């Protein structure tokens, strides 16, 4: 599993909106400036999050984006699955992929890794990241 910039920026946007939610709707240009990401690229990411009902967006004067779900109810795994698709470490865990008989001895190992990844990412909320940024001293 390799998280793309789309997934990482989606998390940054969710954290940004959680940190500034008291201000009401936050204009795209403000988010883009704080996160140092192009407005056009962020617009694509935000539209996915709006369609998933995590954000509400309004265009025009006084418009902007706001969280639709409290930050303590938004899981990192949820945001990454919305933006990245599957978090599976190997394609044979996706329902769409076929499994080779040669992979059978490793199937349980990959399934356990997938379970660990999802449990870990689903155990962290946006509120957790806002409250206390974690320092990670290991690599998965």
Image: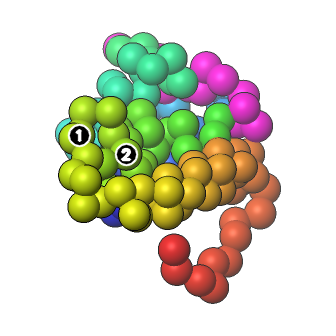
User: What residue does disc 1 label?
Assistant: 97
**What colour-coding does the image apply?**
rainbow
> Against 97, is 104 above or below?
below
Which SS class for mark 1?
A: loop
Q: Cβ–Cβ below 8 Å for labels 1 and 2?
A: yes
Dividing the picture into quadrants, the one containing residue 46 is: top left
Residue at 25% x, 53% y is: 101
Q: Is residue 131 left or right of residue 53?
A: right
The stretch drawn in magenta includes residue 85:
no
Q: Is residue 39 left or right of residue 70?
A: left
Residue at 45% x, 20% y is: 52
Residue at 23% x, 40% y is: 97
Q: Position of residue 84 (x, y in %)?
A: 34, 43
Point out the image quarter for the N terminus.
Answer: bottom left
User: What residue does disc 2 label?
Assistant: 93
Of 58 and 140, the residue lying toward us: 140
Give the magenta range: 60-73
Q: CA distance from mark 1 to mark 2?
A: 7 Å
């Amino acid at each position: 599993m390799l998280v793309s910039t789309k997934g990482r920026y989606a998390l940054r946007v969710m954290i940004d909106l959680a940190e500034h939610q008291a201000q009401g709707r936050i204009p795209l240009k403000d988010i883009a400036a704080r996160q140092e990401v192009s407005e056009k690229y962020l617009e694509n990411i935000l539209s996915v999050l709006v369609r998933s009902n995590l954000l509400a967006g309004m265009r025009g004067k006084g418009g902007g984006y706001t969280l639709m779900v409290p930050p303590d109810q938004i899981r990192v795994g949820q945001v990454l699955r919305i933006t990245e698709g599957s978090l599976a470490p190997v394609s044979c865990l996706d329902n769409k992929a076929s499994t080779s008989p040669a992979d059978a001895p490793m199937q349980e190992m990959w399934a356990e890794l997938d379970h660990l990844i999802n449990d870990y990412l689903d155990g962290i909320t946006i509120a957790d990241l806002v409250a206390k940024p974690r320092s990670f001293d290991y690599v998965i």
